[in-house]
Amino acid sequence: MPTPLSILEDATEFHARHIGPDAVDESLMCAAIGVSSRTALIDAVVPPAIRRAAGMQLPEPITEAGALAELKTIASKNKLYKSFIGQGYHGTHTPGVILRNILENPAWYTAYTPYQAEISQGRMEALVNFQTMVTDLTGMDIANGSMLDEATSAAEAVTLAKRSVKSKSNTLIVAGDVHPQTIEVIQTRCKPLGLEVLVGMAPSLMAEHDYFAVVCQYPSTTGLIHDLKAFTEQAHAKQAAFIVCADLLALTLLTPPGEFGADIVVGNTQRFGMPMGAGGPHAAFLACKDEFKRSMPGRLVGVSKDAQGHPAYRLALQTREQHIRREKATSNICTAQVLPAVVASMYAVYHGPQGLKRIAERVASYTAILHAGLTRMGLKVVTPQVFDTLLVECDAAAVMAKALAAQANLRKLSDKHVGVSLDETTSRADIEALWSWFAPAGASLPTVAEFAAGVESLIPAHLRRTSAYLTHPVFNTHHSETEMLRYIRSLSDKDLALDRSMIPLGSCTMKLNATAEMIPITWPEFAHVHPFAPQDQLAGYAELDQLLQQWLCQATGYAGISLQPNAGSQGEYAGLLVIKAWQEARGQHQRNICLIPESAHGTNPASAQMCGMTVVVTKCDKEGNIDLADLKAKCEQHSDKLAAIMITYPSTYGVFDTQVKEICALVHQHGGRVYVDGANMNALVGVAAPGEFGGDVSHLNLHKTFCIPHGGGGPGVGPVCVVEDLVPFLPAHRTAGIGQPSNIGAVSAAPLGNAAVLPISWMYIRMMGADGLKKATEVAILNANYVSARLSEHYDIHFSGGIAGVKGGGVAHECILDLRPLKDSSGISAEDVAKRLIDYGFHAPTLSFPVAGTLMVEPTESESRAELDRFIDAMIQIRHEIAAVEAGKLPREDNPLVNAPHTSLVASATEWTHAYSREEAVFPLPSLRRQKYWAPVGRVDNVWGDRNLFCSCVPLSEYEEA
Ligand SMILES: *Cc1c(COP(=O)(O)O)cnc(C)c1O
């Protein structure tokens, strides 16, 4: 009998690849939970009041091959023109060894943010290389491990300056020749803080005004290399900070800002091997003087030592500082740009100081040759001292038209001025083409061969760099491809990423990042387009944007969306600004109170603070739900000043609050709007929609729910979604010609933010379809309840829903294991359990968030029953180990938990004095004999590292001494 076609076609469906458990697994898991089916479970745990009225309207799903073909058609609507636009984005060659072994390698892109230091040594070494590269090239004391983009980094530098300088002024001066998108984002950020921004000729403004900081670009957006030393001194005389936006490639040849006294240096590392990608993702940087280091935004990797005294990396100082300092945090940055930072650092490792210098010198020489040819043809170049960019006086329209006809983009600065930026990819033929477009009628065209003897660069002699950089061996060793390949591999071998085991991180949704989803991001049609190219050349991106907006509105129940914010935190910030703008538009300027439950993620209060709002904390009850009585009292108390509430749904405790509709209605009654943090959308897609149950604004984390990989801590995409009446207030991008007067200003440097990773989420939705996405949500809930049900026999499940008939009490998509009682009975802490899991080959669940002393487990739908069982078995075995300590069979101060993780050095040491065997230390379960992950370092000492802060490459002698 033939098989019906529908069954044969079903077999190629993507959702069966994305979702771990199959039908047999499902029924076994349901039995363990005590429910009859997945549907019965969902009916039991998801409150009926919030269920979606109708399904999502999405196109029917197609196969991996089908989706790739369809996306290729969209991609090919982008035009691959040569770009000479500059403005912070340049052509670059990604070395193949880095492209394939980092950017396209799941060992790197599926890694999580390095909170668990012992299993993140490889990526932290790469980040320390990044920090060293930035400090060396800028000449500053210290740099962090990446910022979201140059514009937001400049804005963060401004607030860092405001916090740090003695000047009491509220005025900021921004030179008029800073990149326009940077000026726009600085203006957006300063407005809610009441900081005045003066844009113009820095020297004259500096003479006339009082100010707390000055921002300049080096070289400027038009290419000029200003001598900034005197201005720096002038700023310091007024006790103000001097901030420089700098180009790292130029700094290989120019006096670094640290040498002329700059206080903070920011910039982008895009041209170090990351494709332009229509604006992102790229790693920006922030470097500063030592005295500012303790209030730096973003993440900083530092060197400490492990339990055996060997050097080991870990996140330093302000790690998760939003969670500790909440509304007093210095910044809301959580997800940053780790993967692009790793690429940029590897570009420097591979080329080394000589290689980078040669690339820069070629760019500078080509620019000088271009200049010589243009002037010989009688054209006027108005920028005499430059590195890579010329501003040429000409009939802009005519020249631009000729370039366009030859499929190239120049930058129009006025009807009479055109900018040209050269880069690593510029060829001799490009220069000759440029001459031909600028050539006055009848001029005889020069050839590059005429300048073969070389031309003196246009960098002024007194601003040429004399100091050395990148002298550490790591930048001077791996220059052959073989060495480089092995270095990259040696680092990734140290780390645990999703390609080895599940990463059950609550709130972070570490699900499958399917290969088919990842393939398109390096297609040239997506990778090599400039964010400020003419609109018609970005038609593919426009279609991608428009389709994703439509689909994500379906998923959330909202009316409008902007994909511009490049992390969840940025979506929060944009969303709160939208609410603020709406309140002001109806004359409610006094409304500046933002209610935030005590259980909220730390980015919530940090974002509210950046919007100039006052945070009022509301209580939660013992089930983890918002305390309605307390909320009511606070709404009444602040009724005329209430701007918004920020809630997370399901809550950060992983429960579906049954009163969420009442909460929304209450806040609305008092004139506030409801912000629903969408980080937990993986429990909702297809089942419930925040835009339907009372939310006004949400951000999504496409790097959680919609499959963009975490990249070791970024890139992310944090779209902001709003209901109908808030659509007119979504972020503009006036530099790119987008936005009405009602729209809030730009929140990212590029109009589409981290555009180049959007194809990942597009592929996911296109291949899953409405039913597949709904099933993913249901299986995510099923998996969490399975873990909860099985572990409830061994651990306390905190904040479970207490639902009758559901073993473990019923949770949403994650569950919290409460280890505090065990601390009392055995002295074993949640951290000990987290570190012990490493010996079992697992990345720990979220540690001590949202409740100290707990582990929050989020398995996601992608994990199979076999993998869940492997994790559960490890947790049960660990519970037995704790029991042995409780029973006094193992000493409190010497047991496999407090000594975890055990390195191979420890396990193979000649002497073994512990109260348990070597085998119990490193092979506590028989299955580990088949596959064993060895932690490269022992438990890292955090306190020592913060006391002895060191954030650059470790001298090799340190390893020898240890
Ligand atoms: C991850 C997360 C955020 C922040 O998102 P980023 O992309 O890291 O900035 C905000 N809220 C919650 C609940 C989260 O889990």
Image (tube, rainbow, N blue to C red):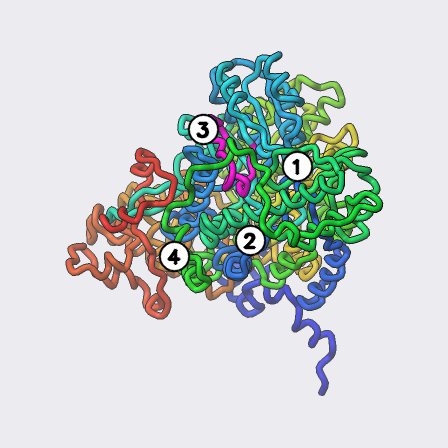
> For the point 59% across and 60% down, which residue is it?
38
Where 829 sits versus 578, above or below? below
The picture places residue 466, in percent across and down from the top left corner, at: 44, 37
Mark 2 vs mark 4, foreground winner is 4
Mark closest to the chain's N terminus, 1 or 2? 1
> For the point 59% across and 66% down, which residue is it?
17
Q: Which residues are magenta?
A: 245-264
The picture places residue 836, in percent across and down from the top left corner, at: 33, 53
Q: Which residue is mark 1?
A: 661
Name the secondary structure under disc 2: loop
- Specify the quadrant of the image occupied by residue 597: top right
Q: Say which amino acid is labelled 1.
A: Lys
Relative to the observer, which residue lies in front, 308 or 46?
A: 308
Q: Which mark is residue 709?
A: 2
Where 683 sits versus 658, above or below? below
Q: Say which amino acid is labelled 3.
A: Ser
Q: Which mark is residue 295?
A: 3
Q: Which mark is residue 494?
A: 4
Q: Say which amino acid is labelled 4.
A: Lys
Name the secondary structure under disc 1: helix
Mark 1 vs mark 2, foreground winner is 2
